[in-house]
Image (cartoon, rainbow, N blue to C red):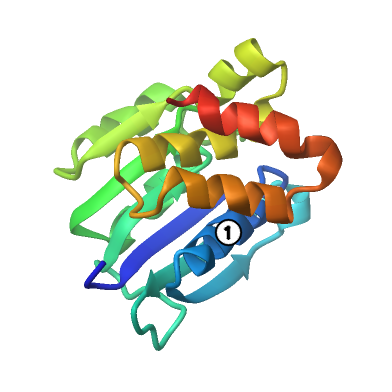
Amino acid sequence: MEKTFNLIINGVGGQGVITLLSLIDEAAMIEGYEIRSSELHGLSQRGGSVETHIRFGKKVYSPLIANGKADLILSLEMLEALRETAKAGNHTKFLINDFALPFQGSLNKEEIKKQLSQLKNEMHIIAASDICKEKLQNEVVSTIYLLGYAINKNLIPLKAQSVLRAIEATVPEKFKELNIKAFNLSW
Protein backbone atom coordinates (compact mmCIF):
# COMPACT_ATOMS: atom_id res chain seq x y z
CA MET A 1 0.00 0.00 0.00
CA GLU A 2 1.61 3.23 -1.16
CA LYS A 3 -0.46 5.87 0.60
CA THR A 4 -1.61 6.12 4.19
CA PHE A 5 -5.10 4.69 4.78
CA ASN A 6 -7.37 6.95 6.87
CA LEU A 7 -10.26 5.36 8.76
CA ILE A 8 -12.78 6.93 11.11
CA ILE A 9 -14.88 4.60 13.26
CA ASN A 10 -17.74 6.00 15.25
CA GLY A 11 -20.71 4.85 17.25
CA VAL A 12 -22.05 5.15 20.75
CA GLY A 13 -20.78 3.82 24.05
CA GLY A 14 -21.14 0.07 24.42
CA GLN A 15 -21.11 -0.79 20.71
CA GLY A 16 -17.49 -1.93 20.59
CA VAL A 17 -15.82 1.01 18.85
CA ILE A 18 -12.67 0.68 20.97
CA THR A 19 -12.54 -3.11 20.48
CA LEU A 20 -12.78 -2.59 16.73
CA LEU A 21 -9.99 0.01 16.91
CA SER A 22 -7.77 -2.49 18.74
CA LEU A 23 -8.44 -5.25 16.20
CA ILE A 24 -7.66 -3.04 13.22
CA ASP A 25 -4.52 -1.68 14.91
CA GLU A 26 -3.35 -5.24 15.58
CA ALA A 27 -4.14 -6.45 12.04
CA ALA A 28 -2.28 -3.49 10.51
CA MET A 29 0.68 -4.18 12.79
CA ILE A 30 0.68 -7.85 11.72
CA GLU A 31 0.94 -6.66 8.12
CA GLY A 32 3.93 -4.48 8.98
CA TYR A 33 2.30 -1.07 8.72
CA GLU A 34 3.10 1.91 10.88
CA ILE A 35 -0.05 2.84 12.81
CA ARG A 36 -1.32 5.92 14.59
CA SER A 37 -4.72 5.93 16.25
CA SER A 38 -6.68 8.17 18.54
CA GLU A 39 -9.83 7.81 20.63
CA LEU A 40 -12.25 10.70 21.05
CA HIS A 41 -14.85 9.95 23.71
CA GLY A 42 -18.04 11.75 24.54
CA LEU A 43 -20.26 10.48 27.33
CA SER A 44 -19.58 6.99 26.06
CA GLN A 45 -20.79 5.13 29.16
CA ARG A 46 -24.21 6.71 28.76
CA GLY A 47 -24.75 6.09 25.07
CA GLY A 48 -22.77 9.14 24.01
CA SER A 49 -20.60 9.47 20.93
CA VAL A 50 -17.34 7.60 20.55
CA GLU A 51 -15.07 8.37 17.62
CA THR A 52 -11.72 6.88 16.71
CA HIS A 53 -9.22 7.77 14.01
CA ILE A 54 -6.88 5.12 12.60
CA ARG A 55 -4.14 5.85 10.10
CA PHE A 56 -1.82 3.16 8.80
CA GLY A 57 0.75 2.90 6.03
CA LYS A 58 4.49 3.00 5.39
CA LYS A 59 5.05 6.22 7.35
CA VAL A 60 2.41 7.92 9.48
CA TYR A 61 3.06 11.10 11.44
CA SER A 62 -0.25 12.04 13.09
CA PRO A 63 -3.18 10.04 14.47
CA LEU A 64 -5.87 12.57 13.52
CA ILE A 65 -7.53 12.69 10.12
CA ALA A 66 -8.14 16.12 8.62
CA ASN A 67 -11.62 17.00 7.34
CA GLY A 68 -12.15 15.62 3.86
CA LYS A 69 -9.26 13.14 4.09
CA ALA A 70 -10.98 9.99 5.42
CA ASP A 71 -10.87 7.02 3.05
CA LEU A 72 -13.57 5.18 4.99
CA ILE A 73 -16.04 6.18 7.68
CA LEU A 74 -17.31 3.10 9.48
CA SER A 75 -20.35 4.00 11.58
CA LEU A 76 -21.92 1.58 14.02
CA GLU A 77 -25.00 3.80 14.41
CA MET A 78 -26.81 5.79 11.69
CA LEU A 79 -27.09 9.17 13.40
CA GLU A 80 -23.36 9.01 14.14
CA ALA A 81 -22.77 8.46 10.41
CA LEU A 82 -24.75 11.58 9.64
CA ARG A 83 -22.62 13.55 12.10
CA GLU A 84 -19.47 12.54 10.20
CA THR A 85 -20.51 13.80 6.77
CA ALA A 86 -18.58 17.05 7.25
CA LYS A 87 -15.38 15.01 7.57
CA ALA A 88 -15.95 13.21 4.26
CA GLY A 89 -14.24 14.13 1.04
CA ASN A 90 -15.49 13.23 -2.42
CA HIS A 91 -13.51 9.97 -2.32
CA THR A 92 -14.67 8.92 1.18
CA LYS A 93 -16.66 5.70 1.39
CA PHE A 94 -19.20 5.01 4.13
CA LEU A 95 -19.94 1.67 5.79
CA ILE A 96 -22.92 2.10 8.09
CA ASN A 97 -24.76 -0.27 10.39
CA ASP A 98 -28.49 0.07 9.64
CA PHE A 99 -29.19 0.71 13.33
CA ALA A 100 -30.39 3.85 15.09
CA LEU A 101 -30.76 4.34 18.81
CA PRO A 102 -34.16 5.80 19.66
CA PHE A 103 -33.17 9.24 20.97
CA GLN A 104 -36.16 11.45 21.68
CA GLY A 105 -36.41 14.24 19.14
CA SER A 106 -33.79 12.76 16.79
CA LEU A 107 -34.28 11.74 13.19
CA ASN A 108 -35.63 8.28 12.43
CA LYS A 109 -33.76 5.80 10.23
CA GLU A 110 -35.62 6.74 7.05
CA GLU A 111 -34.93 10.46 7.55
CA ILE A 112 -31.24 9.71 8.17
CA LYS A 113 -31.05 7.52 5.04
CA LYS A 114 -32.68 10.29 3.00
CA GLN A 115 -30.06 12.82 4.14
CA LEU A 116 -27.21 10.35 3.56
CA SER A 117 -28.49 9.59 0.06
CA GLN A 118 -27.96 13.24 -0.88
CA LEU A 119 -24.20 12.70 -0.62
CA LYS A 120 -22.35 11.60 -3.73
CA ASN A 121 -20.18 9.21 -1.72
CA GLU A 122 -20.18 5.44 -2.04
CA MET A 123 -22.54 4.13 0.66
CA HIS A 124 -22.84 0.68 2.16
CA ILE A 125 -25.73 0.54 4.64
CA ILE A 126 -25.83 -2.96 6.11
CA ALA A 127 -28.28 -4.41 8.67
CA ALA A 128 -25.38 -5.90 10.63
CA SER A 129 -27.10 -5.77 14.02
CA ASP A 130 -30.17 -7.57 12.67
CA ILE A 131 -28.07 -10.17 10.84
CA CYS A 132 -25.96 -10.95 13.90
CA LYS A 133 -28.99 -11.06 16.17
CA GLU A 134 -30.72 -13.52 13.84
CA LYS A 135 -27.74 -15.71 12.93
CA LEU A 136 -25.65 -15.55 16.11
CA GLN A 137 -28.20 -14.44 18.74
CA ASN A 138 -25.85 -11.58 19.61
CA GLU A 139 -25.99 -8.17 17.96
CA VAL A 140 -22.93 -6.81 19.79
CA VAL A 141 -20.65 -8.64 17.33
CA SER A 142 -22.14 -6.61 14.49
CA THR A 143 -18.92 -4.56 14.66
CA ILE A 144 -16.89 -7.64 13.74
CA TYR A 145 -19.39 -8.52 11.02
CA LEU A 146 -18.92 -5.02 9.54
CA LEU A 147 -15.14 -5.43 9.70
CA GLY A 148 -15.46 -8.69 7.76
CA TYR A 149 -17.69 -6.96 5.22
CA ALA A 150 -15.16 -4.12 4.85
CA ILE A 151 -12.32 -6.58 4.23
CA ASN A 152 -14.44 -8.66 1.83
CA LYS A 153 -15.44 -5.58 -0.22
CA ASN A 154 -11.90 -4.12 -0.18
CA LEU A 155 -13.03 -1.07 1.79
CA ILE A 156 -10.07 -1.56 4.16
CA PRO A 157 -6.72 -2.66 2.69
CA LEU A 158 -6.06 -5.46 5.17
CA LYS A 159 -6.07 -9.23 4.71
CA ALA A 160 -8.73 -11.43 6.31
CA GLN A 161 -6.01 -13.68 7.74
CA SER A 162 -4.45 -10.70 9.56
CA VAL A 163 -7.80 -9.80 11.13
CA LEU A 164 -8.35 -13.41 12.24
CA ARG A 165 -4.88 -13.40 13.83
CA ALA A 166 -5.77 -10.09 15.53
CA ILE A 167 -8.96 -11.63 16.92
CA GLU A 168 -6.91 -14.53 18.29
CA ALA A 169 -4.44 -12.10 19.89
CA THR A 170 -6.82 -9.52 21.39
CA VAL A 171 -10.27 -10.99 22.07
CA PRO A 172 -10.79 -12.76 25.42
CA GLU A 173 -10.88 -16.55 25.06
CA LYS A 174 -14.58 -16.92 25.90
CA PHE A 175 -15.56 -14.56 23.02
CA LYS A 176 -13.09 -15.65 20.31
CA GLU A 177 -15.31 -18.26 18.66
CA LEU A 178 -18.29 -15.88 18.48
CA ASN A 179 -16.16 -13.09 17.00
CA ILE A 180 -14.64 -15.40 14.40
CA LYS A 181 -18.14 -16.57 13.43
CA ALA A 182 -19.29 -12.95 13.08
CA PHE A 183 -16.28 -12.09 10.93
CA ASN A 184 -16.80 -15.12 8.69
CA LEU A 185 -20.56 -14.56 8.47
CA SER A 186 -19.99 -11.53 6.22
CA TRP A 187 -18.28 -13.60 3.51
If the image is split into quadrants, where does the C terminus sit?
top left
Q: Quadrant of residue 82?
A: top left
Across and down, in percent, residue 178 comes to 71, 29
**Can the viewer see residue 153?**
yes
Q: At 45% across and 72% down in the image, what residue appears?
A: 32
The furthest residue to the right:
174
Q: At 62% across and 11% down in the image, what residue appears?
A: 134
Q: Which residue is identified by label 1?
A: 21
Q: Residues within 10 Å of mark 1 (few under 14, many from 20)?
A: many
Q: Nearer the viewer, residue 72 or 149?
A: 149
Q: Nearer the viewer, residue 114 or 156?
A: 156
Across and down, in percent, residue 168 comes to 69, 48
Q: At 29% across and 44% down in the image, what residue appears?
A: 154
The furthest residue to the bottom:
61
* Amino acid marked by disc 1: Leu
Across and down, in percent, residue 91 comes to 17, 56
If the image is split into quadrants, where does the N terminus sit?
bottom left
